[in-house]
Image (cartoon, coloured by chain):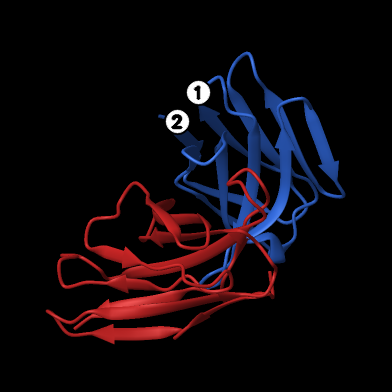
Amino acid sequence: DGGITQSPKYLFRKEGQNVTLSCEQNLNHDAMYWYRQDPGQGLRLIYYSQIVNDFQKGDIAEGYSVSREKKESFPLTVTSAQKNPTAFYLCASSMRQRTDTQYFGPGTRLTVL
Amino acid sequence: GENVEQHPSTLSVQEGDSAVIKCTYSDSASNYFPWYKQELGKRPQLIIDIRSNVGEKKDQRIAVTLNKTAKHFSLHITETQPEDSAVYFCAAGYGFNKFYFGSGTKLNVKP
């Protein structure tokens, strides 16, 4: 899982701002995912992408947007429409399926000021 | 869709004792069951996984058992050590759209 990176580690956002979280992998994985983790809860899927230039909404996509222009990169934008964005955001990748082993990035902790 | 329930939410054991964490799932089509360990502020890391054609899998002090009939699977950690203290997540599902994580178990191993 050392081949998947996220930046920044910590991010502070003022209300009304859009912010973009970076996720890069050099594992040659086709599939990439964004999860949100809140205290005491499991991982909830925001968006996923199985192939370049294609992505699908997960369970909690409202207020978020993504792009997949390159196989290695899957940035997540948290828009001002996301009313409660403070959380720990995890990016992951796998060969092709969610039931292939998923490797996680180190996470970005987003706080709204 | 799939629903994964995980118990207990917290577990405290003495060093050297065994720890067992249980998960149940709802969709009989689920065929992949991984377990992740997450230390505070760190990324989840896969510690063991099992597929539906296997009933039990062991890796040193860690084992996972699967009962497809009852739709539950369990993580067993023997001879626990303080470095086993972390949050453990189970997950279950198949394909892309039927894959969900449990809510996590915080394991505390007391020296």
Residue, disc 1? B27
For residue B71, which quarter of the picture?
top right
Between residue A86 and residue A102, name the one nearer to us: A102
Tag 2: amino acid: Glu
User: Looking at the picture, how far across and down is residue A85, in whole percent?
Assistant: 25, 68
- Chain letter for the blue part: B
Please say whether residue B64 is visible from this viewpoint: yes
Give the percent coordinates (x, y) of residue A34.
Answer: 44, 61
**Identity of the residue drawn at 81% across and 36% down:** B57
Say if A8 sits above or below B37 in the image.
Answer: below
Secondary-structure class at tag 1: loop
Q: Is residue A108 left or right of residue A26?
A: left
Q: Is residue A79 above or below residue B86?
A: below
Residue B99: image x %, image y %? 51, 39
Chain letter of disc 1 in the image: B
**Mark-to-mark CA distance, 2 and 1:** 5 Å
* Quadrant placement of the C terminus of chain B: bottom right
For mark 2, what is the residue?
B2
Q: Chain of mark 2?
A: B
On screen, residue A81 above or below B89: below
Chain identifier matching the red colour in the rendered picture: A
What kind of element bears circle 2?
Answer: loop
Marks 2,1: beta carbons within 8 A:
yes
Looking at the image, residue A97 lies above or below residue B67: below
Near mark 2 (Cα within 10 A), the count class, few <14, some 14-19 or many ≥20, is: some
Who is closer to the viewer here, B28 or A49? Answer: A49
Whichever of labels 2 and 1 marks the residue nearer the N terminus, that label is 2
Residue A50 location, x and y as percent? 53, 53
Q: Is residue B69 left or right of residue A68?
A: right
Q: Residue furthest left?
A: A16
